[in-house]
Amino acid sequence: GDRCIIGINSTILDGAIIGDECIIGANALVTGLTEIPPRSVVMGLPGKAVRHNDLTIKERAERSAQSYIELKNLHLEGHFPRRAF
């Protein structure tokens, strides 16, 4: 799916279908032929959708992404001096 967050060390096997705006938790295993609905949170071995249509998580992810963009811009504008090693 588009605009998904895939957690560290998670595995999505061939044939799995992940909907848009899903979050796959760290260490989750999404087996082949599994279909995950849009805006779901998936956790576990095997991965199971534990939440559906959770806009709160989507909003948090968007805010987090925006904060990283703003931090990048501050660095590019020179607000953080380079440290000498």
Image: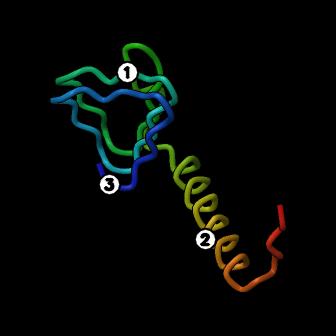
Q: Is residue 40 left or right of residue 55?
A: left
Q: Residues within 10 Å of mark 2 (few under 14, many from 20)?
A: few
The foreground one among 73 and 31 is: 73
Q: In whole angstroms, how far apart are the C-alphas of marks 1 and 3? A: 19 Å
* Residue 23 point in image, percent of width and height: 46, 40
The foreground one among 2 and 58 is: 2
The residue shown at (73%, 78%) is 74
Dividing the image into 4 quarters, which one contains the C terminus?
Answer: bottom right
**Type of amino acid under label 1:** Leu
**Type of amino acid under label 2:** Ile
Q: Residues within 10 Å of mark 3 (few under 14, many from 20)?
A: few
The residue shown at (76%, 83%) is 78
**Disc marking residue 29:** 1
State the image quarter where residue 70 is shown.
Answer: bottom right
In the rendered image, which residue does mark 2 sit on? 69
Q: In whole angstroms, how far apart are the C-alphas of marks 1 and 2? A: 30 Å
Point out the frontmost of discs 1 and 3: 1
The residue shown at (39%, 55%) is 3
Q: Residues within 10 Å of mark 1 (few under 14, many from 20)?
A: many
* Residue 51 point in image, percent of width and height: 48, 32
Q: Establish if 47 lies above or below 12.
A: above
Q: Secondary structure at mark 2?
A: helix
* Residue 22 point in image, percent of width and height: 40, 43
**Type of amino acid under label 3:** Asp
Point out the frontmost of discs 2 and 3: 2
The foreground one among 39 and 62 is: 62
Q: Secondary structure at mark 1?
A: strand
State the residue lying farthest toward the top: 45
In the rendered image, which residue does mark 3 sit on? 2
